[in-house]
């Protein structure tokens, strides 16, 4: 599994201290090819409990995609990188569009329902849109060579991360500036597009490290079922910087920011333009007796507009949060903190789709505490609670209980009970949709729309039965309540109105593992299953049907092979199977991604990569584009 690929995953969430240059960082990655699974099991993650812990002892279904996994996959965009996680469902809908979910609910655009239960963070900055709780994946980008690791949790994380961490958390962590010294060029060109990334890092004295980067891409359009071009080409450019300052061993300060702009062709409509910028500051202070104080503040601006009067919006977000980790005696590890977030938005809709009111403020506040108690040398109990005050509803308690038993260095068993919510958004409460500009409203938001709620019960295990093999397996049962539905207005037919009249359960299994067949050959694979049983509550209209929240495959599997053919050549392949969607909307498919790399010198690497190699094109989402086979030539040069 991907957790066994890079020691850089042992860095803390805010990045490692300023040390080493680019050559040293690359040597560290290369040395990992000789690490045993026992060594790699000791790597640390931070997303499960907001403190460092061994991945092999984390009480959650967590998968780590490392920087070396990303390089060897040939993936150059975040959605394609996330295909490496077996506990995510990644679906491409167009040249620039993706739907990414954990444990189902991939949406139904025909019912105005969109994927909205996954929390995504980039270096501590939340990137889901407060307008509808979903993620615009075409607006998220990171230079692949700057990614340290991506921690992917399937299952709720609301007690630590808050609303929207319902079905999963994706935490993208980039490398410290001290680990990206010198220059880097990443270039790719092929039948489906071109990409170019440039980065340069340096130091100002012994305490300050910095880097700047720029990245541009231009992607060709996809095709219809008949093979006709859809005209959904798109392009994007982004640049940014990072500063890491460590004047004392007890303090680290990071300042980083990005700015981007892009344009996307839309079949039968005006071009859609995207733009954004962000600035994030972190301060980490190590206190006495191992205590740690972390303060994070960020500003984020996002804008989308469609030419020809197709509507536009702007969102300004300001966030401040702090947390402290400390040991209380020998048995208690406490993490506590809180945060404030304010989002200001304005939406200029169309005559047939708009928001009333068109602008507003969304203020979110929370307090949380979590204590991990050592009950015995092999037994730990984690109890946590977050109280969150959302913009539209009263404060909500979000509890979490996890029990971990580690009978040996090669086995960890865990169980968890958690609650999570998806908070109401302007799309739930303020949207107005018409069939024609002069027609009466067809669908409106509900001013009384409530939380969508989840209670989850999970059990799992991390196992290393032999020195050459490791496995992770988990089972879950989710009970949902107050899911969004379309209802008739009281006493009349129109307008239709959002309601909270859907409930039900899902259950499934997630498993992945890795076997070192030879020191130079690694096999890994994963499987996930999902069974959904959703039903309308008494009094519901049931206009669309219980599957209006998504059509999800019941099973998906993957098998990955990574081979080092000598000291300079690597060969990687990733075979994946995705089951058919219910009701036959999209058939099952099998696809293969692959990469052949050649380290010409220590600084120059050439490679050929392919995506979707088994078919000329295939469909992944109902009504979506047919995704094309893509072959590219890639260059990676360090100087």
Image: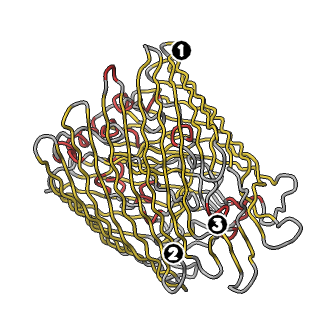
Quadrant where the C terminus is found in the figure: bottom left
- Report x, y in % for residue 110: 68, 71
In this picture the colour scheme is: secondary structure
116 over 380 or under it: above or below = below
Depth check, front residue: 412 or 434:
434
Q: Residues within 10 Å of mark 2 (few under 14, many from 20)?
A: some
* Image position, residue 187 (x, y; %): 26, 66
User: Local crowd at mark 3 within 10 Å, few (<14), some, or many (≥20)?
Assistant: many
Asked whether residue 509 appears in the rendered view, the answer is yes
Q: CA distance from mark 2 to mark 3?
A: 32 Å
Please give the label number shown on residue 375: 1
Which residue reaches farthest right? 491
Q: Which residue is mark 3?
A: 586
| Residue 192 visible to the viewer | no
- CB under 8 Å between callouts 2 and 3? no
Q: Secondary structure at mark 2?
A: strand
Return the residue nearer the eye: 317 or 246.
Answer: 317
Q: Is residue 572 left or right of residue 246?
A: right
Q: Which residue is mark 2?
A: 312
Q: Nearer the viewer, mark 2 or mark 3?
A: 2
Q: Residue at x 22, y 31 (%)?
A: 249
């Amino acid at each position: 599994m991907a957790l066994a690929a890079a020691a850089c995953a042992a860095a803390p969430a805010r990045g490692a201290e300023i040390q080493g240059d680019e050559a040293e960082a690359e040597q560290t990655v290369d040395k990992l090819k000789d690490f045993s699974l026992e060594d790699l099991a000791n790597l640390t993650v931070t997303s499960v409990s907001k403190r460092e812990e061994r991945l092999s002892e984390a009480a959650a279904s967590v998968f780590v995609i490392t920087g070396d996994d990303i390089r060897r996959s040939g993936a150059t965009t975040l959605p394609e990188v996330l295909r490496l996680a077996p506990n995510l469902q990644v679906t491409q809908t167009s040249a620039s569009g993706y739907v990414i979910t954990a444990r189902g609910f991939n949406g139904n655009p025909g019912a105005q329902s969109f994927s909205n239960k996954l929390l995504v963070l980039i270096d501590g900055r939340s990137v889901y849109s407060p307008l509808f709780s979903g993620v615009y994946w075409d607006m998220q980008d990171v230079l692949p060579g700057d990614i340290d690791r991506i921690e992917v949790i399937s299952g709720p994380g609301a007690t630590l991360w808050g609303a929207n961490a319902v079905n999963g958390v994706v935490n993208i962590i980039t490398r410290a500036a001290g680990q990206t010294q010198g220059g880097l060029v990443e270039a790719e060109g092929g039948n489906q597009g071109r990409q170019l990334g440039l980065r340069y890092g340096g130091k100002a004295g012994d305490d300050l490290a910095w880097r700047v980067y720029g990245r541009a891409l231009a992607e060709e359009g996809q095709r219809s079922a008949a093979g006709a071009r859809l005209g959904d080409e798109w392009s994007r450019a982004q640049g940014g910087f990072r500063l890491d300052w460590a004047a004392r061993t007890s303090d680290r300060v990071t300042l980083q920011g990005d700015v981007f702009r892009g344009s996307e062709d839309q079949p039968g409509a005006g071009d859609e333009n995207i733009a954004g910028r962000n600035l994030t500051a972190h301060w980490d202070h190590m206190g006495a007796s191992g205590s740690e104080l972390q303060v994070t503040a960020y500003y984020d601006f996002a804008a989308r507009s469609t030419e020809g009067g197709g509507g536009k919006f702007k969102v300004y977000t300001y966030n401040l949060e702090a947390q402290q980790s400390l040991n209380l005696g020998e048995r208690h590890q406490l993490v506590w903190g809180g945060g404030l977030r304010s989002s200001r938005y304005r939406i200029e809709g169309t005559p047939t789709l708009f928001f009333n009111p068109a602008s507003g403020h969304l203020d979110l506040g929370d307090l949380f505490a979590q204590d991990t108690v050592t009950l015995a040398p092999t037994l730990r109990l984690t109890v946590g609670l977050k109280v969150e005050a959302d913009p539209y509803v009263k404060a909500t308690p979000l509890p979490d209980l996890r029990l971990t038993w580690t009978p040996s260095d090669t086995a960890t068993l865990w169980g968890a009970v958690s609650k999570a919510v998806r908070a109401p958004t302007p799309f739930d409460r303020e949207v107005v949709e018409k069939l024609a500009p002069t027609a009466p409203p067809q669908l409106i938001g509900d001013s009384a729309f409530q939380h969508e709620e989840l209670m989850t019960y999970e059990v799992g295990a991390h196992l290393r039965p032999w020195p050459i093999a490791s496995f992770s397996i988990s089972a879950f049962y989710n009970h949902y309540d107050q899911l969004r539905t379309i209802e008739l207005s009281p006493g009349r037919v129109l307008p239709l109105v959002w309601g909270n009249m859907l409930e039900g359960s899902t259950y499934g299994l997630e498993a992945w593992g890795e076997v070192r067949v030879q020191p130079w050959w690694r096999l890994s694979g994963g499987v996930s299953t999902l069974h959904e049983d959703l039903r309308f509550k008494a009094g519901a209209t049931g206009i669309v049907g219980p599957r209006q929240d998504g059509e999800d495959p019941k099973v998906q599997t993957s098998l990955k092979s990574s081979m080092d053919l000598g000291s300079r050549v690597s060969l990687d392949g990733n075979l994946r199977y995705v089951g058919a969607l219910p009701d036959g909307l999209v058939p099952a498919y099998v696809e293969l991604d692959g990469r052949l790399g050649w380290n010409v010198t220590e600084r120059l690497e050439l490679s050929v990569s392919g995506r979707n190699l088994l078919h000329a094109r295939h469909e992944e989402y109902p009504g979506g584009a047919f995704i094309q086979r893509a072959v590219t030539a890639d260059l990676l040069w360090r100087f």
